[in-house]
Amino acid sequence: MNQTTKYLIYVRKSSESEDRQVLSIDSQVKELKDWARRSNLQIAEIISESKSAKAPGRPGFNSLMRKIYKSKANGILCWKLDRLARNPLDGGSLIWAVEEGKIQEIATPQRSFNNTGNDKFWMQLEFGMAKKYVDDLSDNVKRGLRAKLEQGWLPGPPPLGYLNDKASRTIVKDPERFPLVRKLWNLVASGVHSPSQVLEIANDQWGLRTRQTRCLGNKPMSHSTLYRIFHNPFYYGVIQRHGQLFAGAHEPMD
């Protein structure tokens, strides 16, 4: 550790799966400030953000690099190297800044990285491992979604009239809305009512409302909602996903 270096503390945590086991931002800040105080290190600023590092474009990271190139600081403290980057562009920019001498040291509680061939090799290796972790995680999620579709279950929230059953991880009928949405289909099939009339009957006479979520819902249906209902093959037992069709295991609206 270099006591003549002025350090920026960078902390990051996202809500995505890649960061589920990482210390909270407040915990990272506390640990790094305590560590800097014990080591008598000069801290210029603390930069924190809640955003995934799997793609370039993080405002906090970009601010960090601008301050480095404007010589506001010449060292970085972070909890782990993967807090700084999980993509090759950001990782490469850090290594290049070390190569140019803009960054004198990147320090973590585990080890420090300086402008030596060995340290830059290990930085490349750790950034590469962080990128591979993100890629593997993405591949696993895609495989899981594909397996769920092949079993006949729609990943994510189902359309109006159905609910996710968290206990069984399946899709079940919404006891409140399923019968009303089925009646919508019967109205349209009769050919007697126009879409506007169907919408008016559903909203005003039946009191049909959209599903309540944490921030939205419990609203009268709009024309676009009605359109999506009548053009969604899910209601007759088929799941359409990325141009492919899968036989659904849920109960259709016959």
Image (cartoon, rainbow, N blue to C red):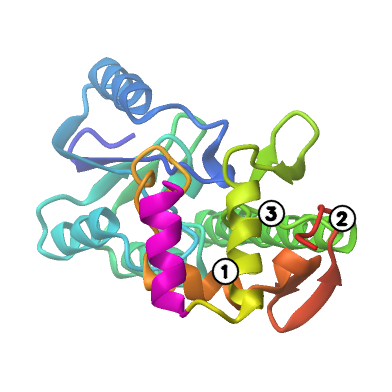
Q: Which residue is mark 3?
A: 137
Query: Image point 72% across, 66% down: which residue?
Result: 234
* Badge nearest the viewer, 3 or 1: 1
Q: CA distance from mark 3 to mark 1?
A: 33 Å
- Are the residues tagged 3 and 1 within 8 Å (C-beta)? no
Q: Main secondary structure of the magenta part?
A: helix
Query: Image point 57% across, 69% down: which residue?
Result: 229
- 36 on left or right of 136: left
Q: Amino acid at mark 3?
A: Leu
The first of marks 2 and 1 along the sequence is: 1
What is the crowding at mark 2: few (fewer than 14 residues within 10 Å), some, or many (at least 20)? some
What is the crowding at mark 1: few (fewer than 14 residues within 10 Å), some, or many (at least 20)? some
Task: Provide the secondary structure element on which disc 1 rests.
Answer: helix
Task: Provide the secondary structure element on which disc 2 rests.
Answer: loop
Q: Which residue is mark 2?
A: 249
Q: Amino acid at mark 1?
A: Ile
Tell me the quarter of the picture where residue 189 sits. Answer: bottom right
Q: Relative to 235, does residue 44 appear above or below in the rendering? A: above
Residue 246 is a magenta residue: no
Q: Relative to 6, does residue 183 appear above or below in the rendering? A: below
Q: In the image shown, does 145 or 220 lie closer to the viewer? A: 220
- 141 on left or right of 4: right
For the record, the magenta segment spans 194-207
